[in-house]
Amino acid sequence: ACDHMDNAPHLCAAAKSHIDGQSNPSVNLDWLIFRDKISSYHPIELLDSDERWEQIEVKFNEMTDIPRLCLSTEWKNKLLQTSLESEKALTPESWYNSKEGLENLMIDFEEKINSKLCSMDIETILLSAEWQDFLTDLQEDEVEKGS
C-alpha cells in the first residue's frame, strides 16, 4: 500500500522500519460463548471446577459441519458497498483501479463474510438431539456417581 500512498512517505518509512513483536490476531470466542449458554438450553448443573467441562469441550472441538448464523444478503451487500466506498475515499484512484485494489478487497470480503463475520448457531447445536442426549448422559452419570 505504501507504493500508492505518495503523500505519506514518512509514515510508510516508519511502518516499514518498525518491527513489532505484538500482533492483534482474532480470537475465537465460540467455546467461551457456547460454554456460557449450555445452562440456557439444558438443565445440567455444572460448576466452574466440574470435571465434565473437559468432556464437553472435547465434544465441542470434535464438531464438524457447524451451523452458522450469517448476515442476510441485504446486509452483506450494504456492508460491501460501505467498504468499497471507504476504500475509494481513502485511497488514490490508481490503487483502487489497480489489479490489487478493489478486486482484492472484494475477494477478501467474500472470504470473510461467510466465515469471520458469522457466528456459531449455538441454539441449533444445543437443542439438537445429539447434544441434548450427550448432556443428559453426563447429568445422569453424575447423579449415579453421587448416589
Image: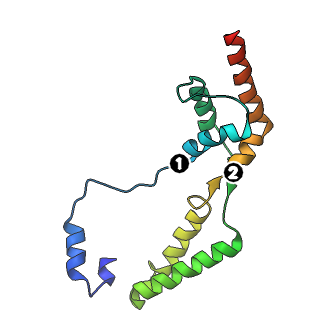
Q: Residue at position x 70%, y 72% from top? A: 73
Residue extending furthest toward the bottom: 93
Residue type (three-letter) at the residue carrying disc 2: Asp
Residue type (three-letter) at the residue carrying disc 1: Leu
| Drawn side of residue 133 relative to residue 116, left or right | right
Say which of 9 and 118 sits in front.
118
59 shown above or below 111? above
Quarter that holds the C terminus: top right
Quadrant of the rendered image containing residue 20: bottom left
Sort mark 1 into few (<14), some (14-19) or many (20+) by Cα contacts within 10 Å: few
Q: Name the residue under label 2.
A: 121
| Drawn side of residue 41 relative to residue 104, left or right | right
Q: Give how far across and how far down residue 109 sits, in percent.
A: 55, 70
88 shown above or below 56? below
Q: Name the residue under label 1.
A: 29
| Drawn side of residue 131 relative to residue 59, left or right | right
Quarter that holds the N terminus: bottom left
Residue extending furthest toward the right: 129
Helix, strand or loop status at disc 1: loop
Q: Which of marks 1 and 2 is nearer the N terminus?
A: 1
Say which of 140 and 70 sits in front.
140
Q: Give how far across and how far down residue 128 sits, in percent.
A: 78, 40
Say which of 29 and 48 sits in front.
48
